[in-house]
Image (cartoon, grey):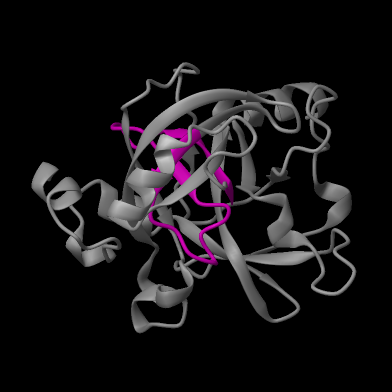
Amino acid sequence: MEKLKFETRKHFFRRDELPSPLSEAAENVGRVMVDGYRMGTCFVASLDDRKFLVSALHCFLERQNKALTEGWAVFPSGDNFLVKPQWVLPPPSTAPDLDLLVSEVKRTGSIRPFRLSESHLPMIGQRVTLLGYPLSHLYSPEAENGAVASFGVIDDLTPSVTSGDDIWMYVKVENGSSGSPVLDENNKVLGVLVHTVEPGRGGVNQSANIRRKSQKMNYVSVATSLNILSTIKDFG
């Protein structure tokens, strides 16, 4: 598996190319659809006996006026459900501009929720997995069978003025990857991908730009599992 992850120039791996249990996890990642458009990625996380849909907030914005709107979470299992603005939990007051959507769901059908990582202190250099629906794979036949995986490395841990504590990492992403769960080595959620970052801005390490270009990677910001937990505990 180490060779598959880090000794190849390939960036995305289909579910049938992944080992168990990662291949099974890919079946439990959904797509966000708003007004008939596929806007990004989503997943279900569990906390105690409760279940929550998690994604990037901007995946549920109207294309024209950018207002929060209702959308559908569409899963390979066929267990699809509606998400309405009034069901979305507001972000903590410490991070009012957090690009994170959390909405409680009462039923999940055959979807197996992800567990949030117990570790709120990810390590620089830690290897992680993203499961999502990047644009190049979004309309392929494989998209109906589950998300594709990409692999990355945590590069920095930086407090952010607008979104709480961020994980900065480099990994290959495309449009459609927003909302992807970021998994640790035990397939537990470290966070959710919210946006790409331009190295050298906002305190981001400029040396990341060299790595990004040499490896054809993107530098991205991840809202941590602590952000998710804070949202649930403050307003859930």
Residue visible at 48% across and 73% down? 135
Of 3 and 229, which appears nearest the observer? 3
Image spot of residue 32 (x, y percent): 62, 65
Of 112 and 115, which appears nearest the observer? 115
Q: Quadrant of the N terminus?
A: top left
Residue 183 seen from this side: yes
121 shown above or below 9: above
Residue visible at 88% across and 61% down? 67
Image spot of residue 11 (x, y percent): 28, 60
12 shown above or below 171: below
111 shown above or below 229: below
Q: Quadrant of the C terminus?
A: top right
Image spot of residue 190 (x, y percent): 47, 31
As drawn, the residue found furthest toward the left would be: 3
Image spot of residue 151 (x, y percent): 31, 48
Q: Quadrant of residue 152?
A: top left
Tell me which segment is drawn in magenta.
168-196
Q: Is residue 190 magenta?
A: yes
Number of numbered discs present? Answer: 0
Relative to residue 193, is residue 57 drawn left or right?
A: right
Relative to residue 70, is residue 208 drawn left or right?
A: left
Residue visible at 83% across and 33% down? 96
Q: Is residue 210 magenta?
A: no
Of 231 and 156, which appears nearest the observer? 156
Residue 80 seen from this side: no
